[in-house]
Image (cartoon, rainbow, N blue to C red):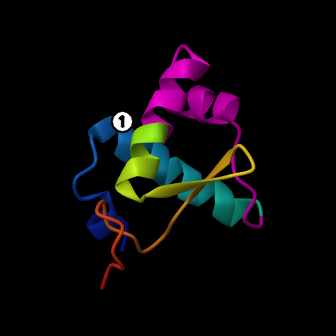
Amino acid sequence: MATKAAAGMTPCETQIWKFMLRFQAEHQGLAPSMKEIADACGFGTISAVGNHLSRLARKGAVMNRNRRYLALRGKDSAGTKAS
């Protein structure tokens, strides 16, 4: 499913999305902070992560819940259910 869900994402967006999925699986569904994403993916600023997360949210790959972004498994970049 990860390959289908990553379709239409930039390489940076795919890297962030895959990191978020791994993090959530390892932490009982807890979303990583923007700092954790920046550190894991090699971004120099939190704002760069925020920009990528905003684009991922518009593509339907993540959702913003209480100012924390959750990666959605089984969604393609258009937000439809992946088969």
Residue type highlighted by circle 1? Cys
The residue at the point 65 percent across, 33 percent down is 34
From the image, give the main secondary structure of the stretch colored magenta. helix
Residue 32 belongs to magenta span = yes
Magenta-drawn segment = 28-53
Viewer-proximal residue, 36 or 57?
57
**Split into 4 quadrants, where in the image is the N terminus?**
bottom left
Indicate whether 36 appears above or below 45: below
The image shows residue 44 at horizontal and vertical percentages of 53, 14
Position of residue 81 measured from the top left corner of the image (x, y, whole percent): 36, 79
| Nearer the observer, 49 or 78 | 78
Residue where numbered disc 1 is placed = 12
Position in image of residue 56 (x %, y %): 42, 47
Magenta-drawn stretch contains 73? no
Number of numbered discs: 1
In this view, the residue farthest toward the top is 44
Above or below: residue 79 compared with residue 48? below
- At 49% from the left and 40% from the top, the residue drawn is 53
Q: Residue at x 68, y 28 (%)?
A: 35
Q: Residue at x 57, y 51 (%)?
A: 20
Does the rendering let one see residue 42?
Answer: no
Q: In which quarter of the image is the C terminus?
A: bottom left
Which of the 4 image quarters holds residue 21? bottom right
Describe residue 75's horizontal placement relative to residue 35 as left or right.
left
